Image (cartoon, grey):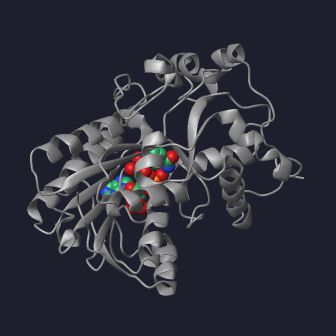
Amino acid sequence: MTTIDKTKPVLVTGATGYVAGWLVKKLLDEGITVHAAVRNPNNEKKLAHLNALAAQSKGSIKYFKADLLTDGAYTEAMQGCELVFHTASPFTTDVKDPQKELIEPAEQGTANVLESANQTPSVKRVVVTSSCAAIYTDAIDSQKAPNGTLTEDIWNTTASLDYQPYSYSKTLAEKKAWEMAQKQARWDLITINPCLVLGPPLNPTAVTSESFNILQQLGDGTMKMGAPKIGLGLVDVRDVAEAHYKAGFTPEAKGRYITAAHNTDFLELGKVLLPKYGKQFPLPKKALPKWLLMIVGPMTNKLFTRKFIRNNVNVAWKADNSKIKKELGIDFMPMQQTMEEAFQVMVDNQVLTAKA
Ligand SMILES: NC(=O)c1ccc[n+]([C@@H]2O[C@H](COP(=O)([O-])OP(=O)(O)OC[C@H]3O[C@@H](n4cnc5c(N)ncnc54)[C@H](OP(=O)(O)O)[C@@H]3O)[C@@H](O)[C@H]2O)c1
């Protein structure tokens, strides 16, 4: 049981991020002082939405410059904090050197943040943004799980430096976090493990998250001939922020939390947009056949290896989200709302423009 004093500042690492933005908003709305650790506190474009949120809320925000790969970088930002949210981690699939660009910032970065927690006597709880990627790599892993369902008891054993290195980075980072948590008794660790996060971005013109590439590809015509029916989970970014908040402030919160609202597939993400946007945008309407993907996939997209297609296309994905519903009272948003509101923000900000 860990009770957090809301009058003390709360640290959010990677505060510029897509997921972190909504978490910072929630904290500010609750009147909390946010210590926002960012790589570049002078990047006005990346901070404008956070400054605007702070101006409209009861809480306040203070920036600290910190990079995951600099030892002790988060110690100053953590001073006086009882609660730390560690969200920073590169989420991209476009990498040349996965060890340097993904594994090191994820794993060493997590160790760095937790080492600062070890050095900071005020810290009582750390909430790490892990991922369902620390639980599975391919949709077929969910079918091989007991009862064909992913649960918090399962760890990813199939990702590697050469295959789905982002998933590998999240697995190593979360393992490191549990290893360090178990070596001390002052702070407790909770992990939020979201599946694919979509929903409206707070800073649509300065986003790095891979979530946006997916939204963009659905609407820009890349998939007008059809989309691969890849089994996956979907969750709204606002529910992920709420999950973090509740994990931080619920005294009984414990362990890992699968944060997945819907067991769905990639094609379905496009299809739910058809009623509202189908006339104006070249959205995918049908599934691309697996045999065709096996032939053209590896030539068109380096992630679409035959192994990936075999293990994911036309393979259903299923996860059990009952723990977070029961213990943190999370009530997930409908998929239609998540997709339409995300798409509308992209349209309003001319990230996507109508073709018709
Ligand atoms: N989006 C999803 O579908 C999804 C699903 C499951 C889990 N997650 C996890 O959620 C977290 C946030 O992801 P996101 O989708 O919000 O992506 P994002 O918008 O790209 O946010 C990533 C954040 O990490 C920071 N960061 C990256 N490398 C860093 C470094 N070397 N030092 C300091 N900060 C660094 C970025 O800072 P800059 O602004 O300076 O680049 C940014 O604030 C990540 O841990 C990700 O693995 C995301």
The reply to whether residue 356 is visible in this rendering is yes
Q: Is residue 227 left or right of residue 316?
A: right
Measured as percent of width and height from the top left, residue 312 is found at 57, 23
The reply to whether residue 145 is visible in this rendering is no
Residue 71 picture quarter: bottom left
Q: Is residue 351 left or right of residue 284?
A: left
Instruction: Name the one closer to the observer, 295 or 146.
Output: 146
Question: Which residue: 74% across, 48% down?
Answer: 219
Instruction: Name the one closer to the observer, 289 or 2.
Output: 2
Q: Is residue 133 left or right of residue 273?
A: left
Measured as percent of width and height from the top left, residue 19 is found at 47, 58
Q: How many marks?
A: 0
Q: Is residue 113 above or below residue 321?
A: below
Which quadrant does the N terminus fall into?
A: bottom left
Instruction: Name the one closer to the observer, 311 or 351.
Output: 311
Measured as percent of width and height from the top left, residue 103 is found at 30, 39
Question: Which residue: 29% across, 48% down?
Answer: 254
Question: Which residue: 29% across, 54% down?
Answer: 252
Instruction: Name the one closer to the observer, 87 or 125.
Output: 125
